[in-house]
Image (tube, grey):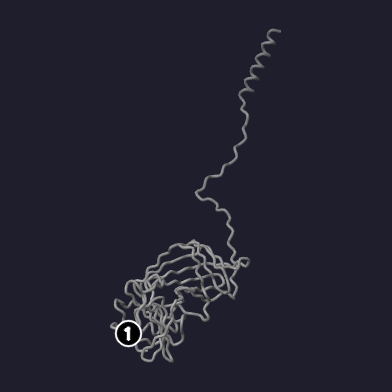
């Protein structure tokens, strides 16, 4: 009996040892994603642009100085703004029409500054490519509010009655005459007001222009067989004074805010001339024009 108990005890110990030697199988860990250097971009919603109605499309100029030319198509606005004979600004604005607000909006607008070293050489500098803003539409005019502008002033654009080709700047008088289709004899050096020197010629279809400067102000002499008045001079300023002068039987329509002339129109039966004087910021200040004697000297120095 004692022997049997010993055998049973031995079997029990063996069974316990076998049970303790077995390990419980753990579940295999879930596979983990390998880290990547690229992140999946979140889906973006593409901006839906509404085309600008045909009735608003066309060519516009700014109402105050006439130095900016705006071309509006169904989905784009381009603005060329001449700051002076040496530099200009060029805006490229992808636009969309807002029917509820009666305005044209834009985002991702691009501004490029162009500085001319000569008629063939210039430097282009991109100032920004994230411009935003809008053009309110009132009585056929475009009222521009640019969020990137240094001043909050609204620029008003008026639609042209006819299409106007862009200006071409050149030092070659023959090239300017060929491009404009207008014959032109610029005033001789002795006929220029004191301190003024020739800068460059500007030409577009139907108009040729000679630009001069004395360092503080610029003077533009324009001639056309087709255009007259504001479309010829590009001067849409309002002046407090308007009077008429005469020189060798030619009537001269003069405008200014003081005792000098900032804008003048004259011509013959077949040609039209304009002379306008402004500072390099394209603003008109009292006293920065030319005298009647200086104007008649210019006229005598040309062969209209």
Can you give x and y, in whole percent of width and height, for residue 182 in the image? 41, 86
Quick check: can you spot residue 301?
A: yes
Q: Secondary structure at mark 1?
A: helix
The quadrant where residue 261 appears = bottom left
The residue positioned 39% from the left and 76% from the top of the image is 258
Q: Left of 303 or right of it: where is 43?
A: right
Looking at the rendered image, the quarter that the C terminus falls into is bottom left
The answer to whether residue 179 shows anywhere in this view is no
Residue in the picture at 64% in, 18% down: 14
Residue linked to disc 1? 297
Residue 33 vs residue 294, the one in the foreground: 294
Q: In screen coordinates, is 189 left or right of 6?
A: left
> Where, quadrant-wise, is the N terminus in this rendering?
top right
Q: Say left or right for 276 vs 93.
A: left
Q: Count residues near mark 1 (Cα–Cα under 10 Å), then give few for <14, some for 14-19, many for 20+.
A: some
Residue with the most extreme right position: 1
């Amino acid at each position: 009996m004692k022997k049997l108990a010993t055998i049973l005890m031995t079997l029990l110990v063996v069974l316990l040892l076998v049970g303790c030697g077995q390990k419980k199988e753990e579940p295999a860990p879930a596979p983990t994603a390998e880290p990547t250097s690229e992140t999946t971009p979140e889906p973006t919603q593409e901006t839906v642009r509404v085309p600008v109605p045909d009735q608003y499309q066309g060519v516009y100029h700014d109402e105050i100085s006439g130095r900016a030319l705006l071309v509006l198509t169904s989905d784009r606005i381009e603005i060329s703004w001449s700051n002076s004979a040496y530099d200009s600004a060029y805006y490229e604005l992808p636009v969309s029409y807002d029917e509820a607000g009666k305005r044209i909006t834009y985002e991702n607008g691009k501004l490029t500054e162009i500085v001319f070293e000569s008629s063939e050489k210039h430097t282009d500098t991109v100032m920004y490519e994230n411009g935003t803003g809008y053009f309110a539409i009132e009585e056929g005019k475009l009222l521009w509010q640019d969020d990137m502008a240094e001043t909050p002033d609204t620029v008003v654009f008026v639609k042209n009655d006819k299409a106007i080709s862009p200006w071409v700047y050149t030092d070659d008088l023959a090239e300017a005459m060929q491009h404009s289709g207008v014959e032109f004899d610029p005033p001789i050096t002795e006929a220029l007001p004191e301190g003024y020197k020739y800068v460059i010629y500007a030409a577009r279809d139907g108009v040729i222009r000679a630009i001069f400067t004395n360092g503080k102000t610029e003077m533009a002499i324009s001639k056309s067989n087709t255009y007259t008045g504001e479309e010829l001079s590009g001067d849409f300023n309002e002046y407090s004074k308007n009077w008429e002068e005469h020189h060798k039987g030619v009537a001269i329509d003069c405008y200014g805010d003081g005792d000098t002339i900032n804008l003048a129109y004259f011509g013959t039966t077949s040609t039209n001339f304009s002379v306008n004087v402004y500072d390099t910021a394209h603003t008109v200040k009292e006293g920065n024009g030319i005298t009647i004697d200086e104007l008649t000297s210019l006229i005598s120095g040309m062969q209209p």
